[in-house]
């Protein structure tokens, strides 16, 4: 290993020496080295006294860790359907052309590589990309040219124009959570006044349910953790927000961070945890510094640390862990695996994290918005909170609206808001479909727009993607299918293989070679994945194709061939290599791939 | 009929269980067959192959991870009235197309659990479009062949090497369909590890990915493990029997 | 199945067979039905088949396909049988999953051709260019990846008894199923 590389690794290891911190170690080493070489991997494995294969398995799991050089500038275009609708593919091709690169290829001088990545949570200000894990928003052809020039000139990313990295909150409609001015520490003081049991009672009265998508009753989670045997407990804030089309936690962390942190401390107060961890998705790395600064400020004000607000015995502090590009880490048990420095593969449940969680200890894992709401409940009381929203869905929901609308951004409504209301407020025109709660949610047609956002009707973790009347819903489903196949952790058979089969079937249809045969296969696969997958990713991976086939059949039918079967591959393309090698292009060197489809 | 306190109902048949046992463990001990690949009595449940999926009180769960409890009504062969065979067969088909499973030349044929479950679920064809992945064969070790074309990612070798042999020779790396076994040596080759043919990890592979050299095809066709008896009718619990190699 | 006066009055079942990228082992195994072929011939008449040497297929009831598709000519033959047969059966490992020829699938067909046709001095390759030759596909494809297949008989080869059981079931209108002794992939 080169001396410089040696130094970097040694420096990182001086700060962090536990195998559970492997992911952070690798991230930090890579910040400076650009990639994890075999030598670096061995040095880290040796220092942590783990097999080198453990390091390899972590590096190869996460999208933002590299075991091959990827360029001094690693550029990743965010590729959710919402960015496609804003023209990101054209910009992507433009950049590749200017840099004379193929997708994913590293330039000969080792300077740059350009590729695609899953949704980076900037749908309201796209097209967007990440350059060395920093988000660049509002991409245009001109900005592509400017970036190519900066890359050519070798200017460090930290010196690029600040405007490139501008991320706006776009709060279009504030409600009970985002609206009121907040006095830092007020929720903590209110919780202390209630006492640990009293605060739990308020949480029960509030009927608060998780805001990350699963909708579990928060007070039940807190109480189970509190009652679990053992001395140590942990509170984890799930800030992985990987569901495409979702960026509400990004805004909460940007501008309401103290409410999230105080919410964590309140959870710690109730369950008896002294330590909180924030799992911040790698795509939000730009928030790390401001969040650390906020934590420091809170510590100075005695809002974190020992004897919070002067309360003896109320000790709680928070550490931030970054993810490294893996949607599956939004699943709470996979998240915990990642916190322990391993690949983010979901655990077998039971036992659940509330009894066996981080480091095997009772752990509460709550979404960013859920924890922020805990401060509201502390201040106004549970009954007040329960009086808002609907009977079964108390409080408000922060929605992140994007797609074909005049005013994409953040909208907070009491639960029970009708979809058509949201569409009116965001300035959507003629709408053909709305995807609620991301690809793992539901796709709704106009005659369903009277339905309400609520756990008892259309649940949502926040994503709200609007598709205008000229949009092809098949492309939406196909984009989502690629997403699930890319993000599948690979642990269980149906999801690992099934998401790939689903993606390939949709690609075949897109290529004009699909028939009713593919439709039957897709429905069968969706059913199998739902029944037999280990976690929510696999279980919901078939949702988009099921919804769109059932509700938007013409989008598929116009692409299907007449017959009932077409070859698995384009047979003429399958002869291309042999044509090349034998230098032939006569009629006999080609074949019509569609004959036989009339069978 | 409510079963007494320490029995569960599997396809209407009462099966006893010890507290702490999973449904799969209780079933296998009682000679009731539930298909599985990644479970091993000495290594515990893994939950990755999903073959052992059954219906318990109306919901799909994996029998290897759910603890048996009185009152459970478990459906193995029919799920809520419809045959479950097609679901299991599809999972086996997925495993077949994901790797390069060429039975005619494989030394494990006839003793292979994946193959046996194919027969058990009446799999006549792998059905799906074959992936034909490029997977390495590692013959560097003097006594053991590592042919990853046949790997089904069950991680039995990973767990056995780590938890029983104390060697950690194998690990699983990559994500999604790029998942693959990696070997713990600077070269990545098995021959450069302290792996031995006497390791437990050399004998837990349910398929032909890890094979002891120079004993291939020792038993003639007709006398191999699953020639003698279909996997569903094996009298003795899994893997206690020293396999014919 | 025995020949009866009744069955001999019915039109014969027409069957076609072919071996694509196969070794003909499945055809040889079919002939392992030995003297039962006499009973079979009371009921079945063969159309295009290596056994009859009829070159092109007309309308038929059953097509038995051995071997996968390695080149364009395989696909032309397969399509002719699919178009003319009511029931198409993939017989044996090669037809079902590509089999032994498909072991080349993780390699580049161009590299293979260059290697095979390397000149004696090793300097260049003399890959044939004749327009009458069928070109190789990038991979060997199982039959069901090229046309719709109705049934599959696994084995390498399936035994004569297996093929016999299958044909019995099919011709007599039963759902073809194989007992454990008849079912194997090797």
Image (tube, rainbow, N blue to C red):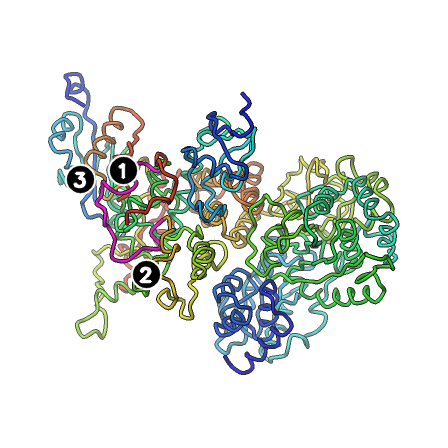
Distance Cα–Cα, label 1 vs label 2: 37 Å
**Can you give x and y, in whole percent of width and height, for residue B152 in the image?**
41, 50
Is residue A62 magenta-colored? Answer: no
Reading the image, the residue beneath label 1 is B228
Q: Is residue B84 above or below residue A93?
A: above
> Do we see residue A244 in this rendering?
no
Specify the quadrant of the image occupied by residue C105: bottom left
Percent position of residue A322, x then y = 65, 62
Q: Secondary structure at mark 1?
A: helix
- Vertical position of residue A549 compared to residue B178: above or below: above
Q: Residue at x 21, y 60 (%)?
A: C130
Residue name at image x 73 percent, y 47 percent? A226
Q: Residues within 10 Å of mark 2 (few under 14, many from 20)?
A: few
Residue underneath mark 2: C107
The secondary structure making up most of the magenta span is loop
From the viewer's perspective, is residue B99 above or below residue C36?
A: below
Q: Looking at the image, which is closer to me, B143 or B101?
A: B143
Q: Which residue is mark 3?
A: C29
Chain containing the residue with disc 2: C
Do marks 1 and 2 share a chain?
A: no
Q: Are marks 1 and 3 in contact (CB under 8 Å)?
A: no
Reading the chain from its start, which is encountered first: label 3 or label 2? 3
**Residue B137, image x, y percentages:** 33, 60
Q: Please tell me whether residue B208 belongs to the stretch shown in magenta.
A: yes
The answer to whether tags 1 and 3 share a subunit is: no
What is the chain letter for disc 1? Answer: B
Q: Residues within 10 Å of mark 1 (few under 14, many from 20)?
A: some
Q: Which residues are magenta?
A: B207-231
- Let me know if residue B51 appears in the view: yes
């Amino acid at each position: 290993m080169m001396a410089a590389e040696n130094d970097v690794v040694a420096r990182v290891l001086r700060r962090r020496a536990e195998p559970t911190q492997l992911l952070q170690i690798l991230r930090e080493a890579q910040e400076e080295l650009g990639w994890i070489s075999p030598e670096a991997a061995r040095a880290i494995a040796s220092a942590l006294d783990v097999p080198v294969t453990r390091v390899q398995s972590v590096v190869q799991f996460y999208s933002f860790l590299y075991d091959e050089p990827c360029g001094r500038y690693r550029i990743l275009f965010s590729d959710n359907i919402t960015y496609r609708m804003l023209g990101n593919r054209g910009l992507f091709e433009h950049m590749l052309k200017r840099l004379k690169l193929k997708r994913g290829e590293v330039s000969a001088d080792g300077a740059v590589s350009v590729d695609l990545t899953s949704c980076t949570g900037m749908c309201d200000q796209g097209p967007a990309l990440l350059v060395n894990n920093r988000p660049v928003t509002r991409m245009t052809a001109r900005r592509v040219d400017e970036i190519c020039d900066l890359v050519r000139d070798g200017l460090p990313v930290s010196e690029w124009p600040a405007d490139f990295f501008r991320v706006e909150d776009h709060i279009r409609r504030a409600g009970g959570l985002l609206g009121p001015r907040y006095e830092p520490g007020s929720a903590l003081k209110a919780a202390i006044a209630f006492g640990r049991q009293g605060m739990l009672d308020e949480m029960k009265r509030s009927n608060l349910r998780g805001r990350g998508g699963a909708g579990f009753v928060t007070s039940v989670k807190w109480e189970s953790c509190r009652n679990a045997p053992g001395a140590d407990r942990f509170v984890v804030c799930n800030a992985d927000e990987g569901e495409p089309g979702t960026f509400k936690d990004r805004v909460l962390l940007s501008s309401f961070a103290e409410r999230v942190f105080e919410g964590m401390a309140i959870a710690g107060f109730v369950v008896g945890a002294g330590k909180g961890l924030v799992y911040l998705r790698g795509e939000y790395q730009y928030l790390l510094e401001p969040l650390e600064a906020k934590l420091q400020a809170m510590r100075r004000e005695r809002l974190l640390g020992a004897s919070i607000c002067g309360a003896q015995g109320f000790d709680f502090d928070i550490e931030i862990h970054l993810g490294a590009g893996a949607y599956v880490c939004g699943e709470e048990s996979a998240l915990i695996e990642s916190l322990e420095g391993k690949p983010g593969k979901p655990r077998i449940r039971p036992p659940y994290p509330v009894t066996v969680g981080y480091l095997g200890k009772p752990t509460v894992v709550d979404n960013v918005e859920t924890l922020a709401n805990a401060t509201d409940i502390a201040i106004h009381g549970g009954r007040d909170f329960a009086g808002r929203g609907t009977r079964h869905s108390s409080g408000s929901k922060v929605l992140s609206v994007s797609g074909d609308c005049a005013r994409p951004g953040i909208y907070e409504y009491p639960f029970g808001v009708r979809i058509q209301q949201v569409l009116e407020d965001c300035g959507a025109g003629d709408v053909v479909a709305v995807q609620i709660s991301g690809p793992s949610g539901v796709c709704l047609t106009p005659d369903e727009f009277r339905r309400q956002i609520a756990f008892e009707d259309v649940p949502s973790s926040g994503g709200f993607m609007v598709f205008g009347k000229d949009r092809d819903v098949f492309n939406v489903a196909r984009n989502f299918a690629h997403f699930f196949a890319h993000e599948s952790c690979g642990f269980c058979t149906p999801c690992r293989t099934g998401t790939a089969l689903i993606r390939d079937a949709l690609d075949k249809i897109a290529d004009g070679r699909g028939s009713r045969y593919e439709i039957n296969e897709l429905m069968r696969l969706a059913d199998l994945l739902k029944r037999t997958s280990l976690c929510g990713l696999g279980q919901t991976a078939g949702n988009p194709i099921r919804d769109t086939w059932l509700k938007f059949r013409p989008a598929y039918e116009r692409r299907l061939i007449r017959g009932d079967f077409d070859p698995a591959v384009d047979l003429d393309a399958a002869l291309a290599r042999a044509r090349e090698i034998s230098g032939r292009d006569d009629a006999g060197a080609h074949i019509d791939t569609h004959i036989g489809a009339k069978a | 009929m409510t079963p007494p306190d320490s029995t569960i109902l599997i396809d209407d048949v009462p099966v006893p269980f010890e507290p702490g046992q999973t449904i799969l463990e209780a079933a296998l001990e009682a000679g009731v067959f539930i298909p599985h690949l990644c479970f091993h009595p000495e290594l515990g449940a893994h939950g990755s192959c999903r073959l052992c999926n059954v219906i318990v009180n109306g919901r799909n769960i994996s029998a290897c991870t759910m603890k048996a409890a009185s009152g459970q009504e478990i459906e193995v062969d029919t799920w809520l009235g419809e045959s479950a065979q097609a679901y299991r067969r599809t999972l086996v088909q997925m495993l077949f197309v994901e790797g390069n499973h060429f039975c005619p030349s494989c030394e494990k044929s006839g003793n292979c659990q994946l193959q046996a479950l194919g027969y058990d679920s009446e799999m006549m064809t792998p059905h799906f479009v074959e992936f034909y992945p490029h997977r390495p064969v590692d013959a560097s070790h003097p006594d053991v062949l590592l042919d990853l074309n046949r790997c089904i990612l069950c991680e039995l070798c990973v767990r056995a090497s780590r938890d029983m042999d104390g060697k950690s020779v194998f690990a699983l790396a990559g994500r999604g369909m790029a998942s693959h076994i990696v070997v713990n040596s600077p070269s990545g080759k098995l021959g450069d590890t302290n792996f031995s043919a006497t390791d437990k990890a050399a004998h837990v592979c349910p398929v032909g990915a890890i094979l002891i050299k120079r004993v291939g095809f020792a038993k003639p066709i007709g006398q191999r493990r699953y020639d003698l008896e279909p996997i569903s009718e094996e009298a003795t619990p899994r893997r206690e029997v020293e396999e014919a190699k | 199945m025995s020949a009866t006066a009744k069955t001999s009055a019915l039109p014969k079942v027409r069957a076609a067979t072919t071996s694509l990228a196969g070794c003909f082992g499945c055809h040889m195994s079919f002939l392992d039905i030995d003297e039962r072929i006499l009973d079979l011939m009371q009921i079945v008449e063969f159309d295009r088949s290596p056994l009859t040497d009829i070159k092109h297929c007309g309308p038929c009831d059953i097509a038995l396909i051995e071997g996968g598709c390695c080149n364009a000519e395989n696909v032309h033959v397969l399509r002719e049988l699919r178009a003319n047969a009511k029931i198409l059966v993939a017989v044996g490992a090669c037809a079902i999953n590509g089999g032994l020829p498909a072991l080349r699938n993780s390699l580049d067909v161009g590299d293979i051709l260059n290697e095979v046709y390397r000149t004696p001095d090793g300097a260049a390759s003399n890959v044939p260019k004749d327009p009458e030759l069928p070109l190789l596909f990038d991979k060997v494809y199982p039959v069901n990846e090229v046309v719709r297949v109705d049934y599959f008989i696994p084995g390498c080869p399936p035994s004569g008894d297996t093929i016999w059981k299958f044909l019995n079931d099919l011709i007599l209108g039963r759902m073809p199923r194989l007992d454990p002794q008849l079912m194997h992939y090797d």
